[in-house]
Image (spheres, rainbow, N blue to C red):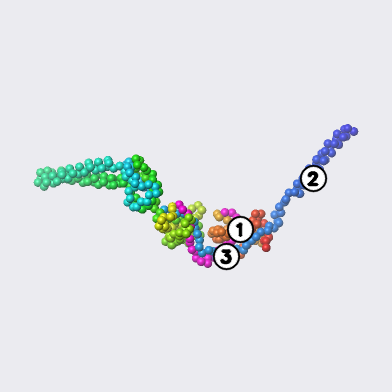
Amino acid sequence: MKKFLYILIPLALIVIVVVRLKSNKEMAQNRIYTYDKEQAIEVNADVVKYGADEDVKYFTGNFEPNKETKLSADVQGKVVQVFADVGSPVKKGDNLLKLDDKMLKLQLQSVEVQIEGLEADVKRYSILASSDAIQGVQLEKAQLGLKSAQVQRSTLLEQISRTVVTAPFEAIVTAKMTEVGSFAAPGVPLFQLTDITSLRFTIHVSENNLNLFHINNAVTVVADTYTSTPLSGKVSLIGSQGNMANTFPVQFLVKNTQDLKIKSGMFGKVQIKEAPNTQHLIIPASAIIGSNVQPRIYVVEQGKARLQNIEIVERRKNIAVVQSGLKEGDLVITNGLINLFEGANVTIKN
């Protein structure tokens, strides 16, 4: 009897465990949601149609000085005087810096003494040569020596004049890289001058908008900081090569305000008027998935969602202007995109 119980009890436990595992498996399967790919997904959709685009477009850019340069000395020497500081307004020809010219002036005095002696020699040899008292070659040597000394004097005078660094145009000193006692040499920057009386305003536009710009066309530019102060300008450059984003630089020459409110580095917008009543394919921006580089949308064809690549000219507020990939009358899905996939059955909400 005991032997029978030893066999029966383990068997009963095994049966109970198997029944419980089977029951748990059935319960777990009942709880798991199985998505039915054939079930129709409710979406919102709009018909693609032509619409009138705005006749005014705005492009963002930034201001740069029309003229800016870094000045260095033409000769080397020790800085003995500095006449300008950062923020100083200067006019063309104003002195900015003075280098030590003592050695050059001493050399000039030596050359002038030589010239004085050579001039006397030329006069004396001229008299003697006229009476055949000396050979003509001596007079020629004295004359050549005099000419050489005169050239040396002109060279030293030019070098002395270049010990004073002057402003090449009317501007503002925006950087000073020297002080009294420092050493200056050709190629070593001393000052940076910036002229903002006129400015260059640069934007980058897509190839589809390049036809809006023409050289010397008048435009209106507004700085973001001074929206109530419109600036007049004209197109000065249209780029011939695009960047990695396939946009092209367009540059405008803009006259600054009289009190020079607009500074280099400020941001602004240029206003361009497009031909009125221009018609474009317009879709809601909410229909677009992906990026501006590769935008895509879902269209409804025979009750199914089809993924479609498109090209857009631009996004503006809640709409997108389509260049290609759609035609008038297409049905574009605008809402309910989360569960969509290629070939999904769809029903359109009323």
Seen at 87% across and 35% down, the residue is: 5
Query: Closer to the camera, 235 or 298?
Result: 235
Residue annotated with mark 1: 287
Seen at 61% across and 64% down, the residue is: 329
Circle 1 SS class: helix
Q: Residue 289's x, y, as percent?
A: 60, 55
Give, as a three-letter code, the residue at label 3: Tyr
Q: Is residue 239 visible?
A: no
- Estimate the spatial distance between the alpha carbons at disc 3 and disc 2, rounded to whole Å: 61 Å
Circle 2 SS class: helix
- Evaluate if marks 3 and 1 touch, with contact meaning CB atoms under 8 Å apart: no
Q: Is residue 77 left or right of residue 277?
A: left
The residue stretch that appears in magenta: 265-291
Is residue 220 within the magenta segment?
no
Q: Residue 191's x, y, as percent?
A: 37, 47
CA neighbours of label 3 inside 10 A, class few (<14), some (14 to 19), many (20+) = some
Residue annotated with mark 3: 50
Give, as a three-letter code, the residue at label 1: Ala
Q: Is residue 308 left or right of residue 230?
A: right
| Vertical arrangement, residue 93 with respect to residue 233, above or below | above
Q: How many marks?
A: 3
Seen at 43% across and 62% down, the residue is: 218
CA neighbours of label 2 inside 10 A, class few (<14), some (14 to 19), many (20+) = few
- Estimate the spatial distance between the alpha carbons at disc 1 and disc 2, rounded to whole Å: 47 Å
CA neighbours of label 1 inside 10 A, class few (<14), some (14 to 19), many (20+) = many
Give, as a three-letter code, the residue at label 2: Ser
Decide which of tag 1 and tag 2 comes sooner along the chain. Answer: 2
Q: Residue 24's x, y, as percent?
A: 78, 44
Residue annotated with mark 2: 23
- Evaluate if marks 3 and 2 touch, with contact meaning CB atoms under 8 Å apart: no
Is residue 277 within the magenta segment?
yes
